[in-house]
Image (cartoon, grey):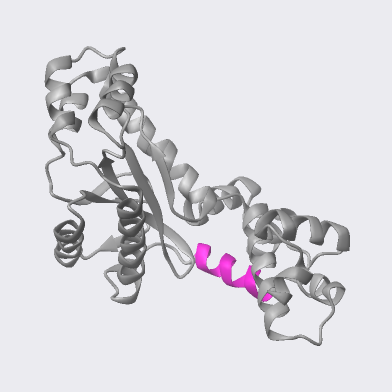
Amino acid sequence: MISTFNLEKLTALLKDFYTVTKIRITVFDEKFQEIAAYPERRADFCEIIRSCPEAEKACVRCDQEAMKKAAERGSLYTYRCHAGLVESILPIYLNRLLIGYLFFGHVFRYDSYEEGWEVIRASCEKYDLKISELLSASLHQPLIAEDYLSSAASMMSAVASFLSMERLVELRRENLPMQIDEYIEAHLSEDLSAAALTEHFGIGKTRLYEIAKESYGTGIAELIRRKRIEKAKDLLLSDPSLTTAEIAARCGFSDYNNFITLFRKVTGTTPGKFRES
């Protein structure tokens, strides 16, 4: 485990979230192990689903795949689970290192119970479940509107920030991931290939890739690209005297056209339009 959570304060924070939203919230570590949740007991709907071993395996698999996607995106990921309910997962970062995930669900995000039940029944018919019990549990789920779900997701983002600011989480692993992160930040204009990093830190490529996936939630090349684009965005806004070509060079892009293409892919616009807006 990469971090230690203050469980007493963490549970109190999760309780506050539930009091306001009435949505169950859970914290996982970076290995996808559950650390804390409020309420501790899952909703009746989920307990019924997990009463079937095959469905329970699907729940675990669904959660883990969603956490991986959230880590790859580096942001909130909202999706419909295998049983038909909506869930959201948000990566938690401390000093730019991935330390866990905030998860909330299982939300009945439909316009009507009839619409929701059709989807749920179709999603769960392959499992050995008592349909009458599942229907009853579905009808006891509150109907959640889209704007309510969006507001709850925003609150969860605030909870993630609070975890870091109030030091409810502390790193307690070797500092190599932090050293690599800081080195990349300081040398974005230089050669940051995997070979260069492994040589500088005296580790193998396999170990470097493991650190990247475990600590940053993405591959080392993607991490470097993200950081370079973020630096480019900062320079575009903070120093109008720099040309786009100069900014590309300062951020480690030797190919100007590649910089423009990647910048557009990440931000949805060109460097020039980003600066104007």
| Total numbered labels placed on residues in the image | 0
Along the line of sight, which residue is nearer the eye, 113 or 244?
113
What percent of the width, then of the height, locates residue 139?
A: 15, 30
Residue 220: which quarter of the image?
Answer: bottom right
- Which residue is found at the position 34% from the left and 67% from the top? 158
- Which residue is found at the position 68% from the left and 65% from the top? 229
- Which residue is found at the position 17% from the left and 67% from the top? 9
Left or right of 44 on screen, residue 179: right
Question: Which quadrant of the rendered structure holds the C terminus?
Answer: bottom right
Q: Main secondary structure of the magenta part?
A: helix
- Which residue is found at the position 56% from the left and 53% from the top? 212
Residue 181 drawn in magenta: yes
Query: 91 above or below 240?
Result: above
What percent of the width, then of the height, locates residue 201?
A: 63, 63
Q: Is residue 42 visible?
A: yes
Along the line of sight, which residue is nearer the eye, 119 or 158?
119
Along the line of sight, which residue is nearer the eye, 55 or 218?
55
What percent of the width, then of the height, locates residue 34?
A: 26, 46
Along the line of sight, which residue is nearer the eye, 199 or 26?
26
Residue 52 drawn in magenta: no
What percent of the width, then of the height, locates residue 76?
A: 44, 53
Q: Which residues are magenta?
A: 176-186
Query: 259 above or below 26?
Result: below
Left or right of 98 on screen, residue 23: left
